[in-house]
Each structure stands twice: as structure tokens, then as C-alpha cells.
Image (cartoon, rainbow, N blue to C red):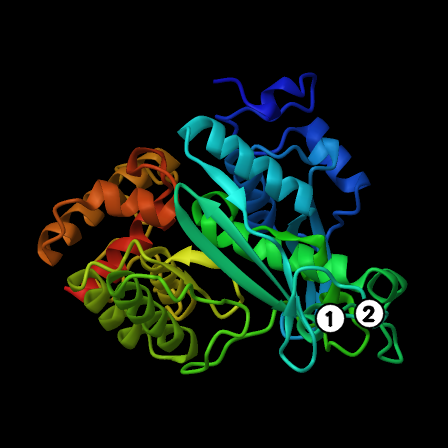
Amino acid sequence: MTTDIVRAGGALAIRPDQIDWTPEQAVVLQQSGIDGDVTKAELSGFLHLCQRTQLDPFSRQIYLIGRKDKRAGRKVFTPQTGIDGYRVVAHRVIAETRESFGYEDTLWCDSAGNWRDVWLPDEAPAAAKVTVLRNGQRFSAVALYREYVQTDFNGNPSRMWKNMGANQIAKCAEALALRKAFPHDLAGVYTAEEMAQADNSQAEERHLRKVQPGEADPWATPDPQETAEVKGRSRPAQDIADVAGTTTDRTIVQGLYRQARAENLLAETVKTADRELLELGAYLINRGQQLAEPAPSADAQSDDGVIDAEVVESDTPAAAPPEDAATVAERGLRAAAVTAGLPNIEEEFERSYGLPIAEAGAAQLNEMAGLLKGAA
């Protein structure tokens, strides 16, 4: 099926099999405001996201926006789109899957907790609620005005949020509901309305609000008709993700991965500390990498027994080709999977990294092998 990205045509068209930005594409991206602070990982992730969502950055359907981050000590770039981009992705998925799709009436709430289906007061509502219907299931979400409102230096709402507060907060609620209904298709990209508060002068460079371990999620409104089975699977997965997000001990993360695998929770969707939606297995692997100890020297092996990507047996002094390093790393990963009792390593790896083992780099293969060794 031909995608919207391919139909864009010309030198800027993004190919489904493309693994890096072309020189022509890079020039246009630079002109769009992506400066030298952007990292290669952020650019690679943005390309993957454009391919997955089939949104075209050169038609301004999706952006990579940089914001100063004090903790990172640099400008951090975040993928961003508008609510129309979310709707495009949702309707495309529905057309491909032939599922049913719709909305219930949008609701707004006043400061006293009274809900109504039309907002007439001059002041902004306290919250908005949107419910998306996908294939007979309800996905509801509530957005609080105070969490999303964009303000000026004095803390007053910006012109758009002052004049159209009900519309703006409804877009935020719709984005949250759509992301719950289409987690695999919309994970990792936020709407402009959601991210407006990240530009607040008093926001201290914050992005989306972090939910603390044990704290109820103020943005999500679980459907009271949800089955006990769904509740029983989603909450334990989120609890594991919360613990992984706060610990600084890699061995704890490895134990959490083992627990999640034993309870069949690796494929559950969770909200990370940065408010990103990810599958639990992928998040635990990424978290384990963040807490990994510095890599050993080139003539040594890592603590978990997996040979580093740079270390390849060779009779010549020249560095081994990258594909040889990946082959060695794949061998180590498969051995670790056998030791850990994980027969479906192909499926687990692709679910966690979004690509098959055959297309992965040595670093990714070694990363998962190390986690499996620790969880064995």
C-alpha cells in the first residue's frame, strides 16, 4: 500500500526502507529550525517516527522542536504535530484495519466539578474530557487546564489560551484519548497544544508533568466499565515502570524485567517518567541501558559476558567491519536468550526495538543480551 510519505515525491520523499536522512532532506530540516544542538539519536528517532506515523515533515505535518533543558545542559528536540496529524494517523489505521471508529461528545468541567457538553462561560474550563471509540472499546482521557495552559512571563494565559481556552484544552484531551486508543501508532509524538506549556517562562524548562510512583494519573480517566482483567494487567505493568523510572540500580531493573516477563507484562503499554507511551519491555531495556556502567576496555568483555561491539576476533590489525560486530553480538544475544529461557527472542527483540534482529546494530543486540544475562 502506497503511503502518504511516498506520495510526497521528489528528492524529499521519505522511503520506508530509508535508514538516514539524505543530504537534501538534512538541508531542509536545518532550515526548519533544527540546529547543531540536535543529536544523531534524535534525528534517527525522528526519521523512524516519520516512517511509522507516515506523517511528512516537509509538508509540515510533523516537526522536531528544540527546547532548552537545564538538566540536559542543551537544547532537547521533541517530535511534535497538531491534532490534525493525530486524526490523520487514526483514520489511516482504521482504513487499514477496517475497524469502527468514533467519538462521544466532548465534555468540559468547571471548577466545582460540574460537567457539561457545551462551554459558554467567559472564563476557561477547569478540564475537558474526550472519549474515543475504537472497535467497540472506549478510551477516555481528561486534560486539566492548569496542566496545559501556556502562559507569559507574568503567568497569564497566552492570547490563544485566553481567547480559546475551551478549544485548546479539548484538543489536549482528544490527543490523550487518541494516544490511548492508538498507542503503537502515536507513541513518541505529542501535539502542539500538549507541548505549549513547555514554553512557559515559569516552567523551568519542564516538558510533560511527571507522575510520581504511587500517584494516580490526573490525565487518564479509566472507564468504569473496564473489565477486571484489563485493570489487573495494566496497573501492575505501570507499577513496574514507575519503580524502574526512579531506581538508580541497574540490577533492580533487571529483576523488574524478569518479573514482567514471568507475568506476561512485557507487551503492556505504560507511561514512562517523561510521559512517553512505550511497551514495558522496551522501556525496561532502555532504562537498563541508561543505568549501565561505563563500557570496559576494548580487550575486555562486559560484566555480563557479552563481547562489546568493537571487539571482534581478527587476524589483521584493521578494525573489523560493522557487520562482523553485529554477527558476534547476535550470537551473544541468542546464547543469552537460551540461558534466560526465552524461546521467542525474535519476537521480543522486534517488539522492544521496532526492528528485526537481522537489521539491528551491535549496540542494540549487546544491550538486550546484557539485560537478559542479568535477568537470567
Q: Secondary structure at mark 2?
A: loop
- Nearer to us in this view, 257 or 118: 118
Dot label at residue 121: 2
Give the alpha-carbon distance from disc 1 to disc 2, as whole Å: 8 Å
Is 265 situated left or right of 285 in this image?
left
CB atoms at circles 1 and 2 under 8 Å apart? yes
Reply above or below: 111 against 340.
Answer: below
Q: Is residue 374 visible?
A: no
Q: Quadrant of residue 346?
A: top left
Q: Residue at x 74, y 59 (%)?
A: 168
Q: Amino acid at mark 2?
A: Pro
Picture coordinates of residue 208 (x, y %)?
61, 68
Picture coordinates of residue 206 (x, y %)?
67, 72
Dot label at residue 125: 1
Q: Residue at x 47, y 33 (%)?
A: 94
Reply above or below: 1 against 92.
Answer: above
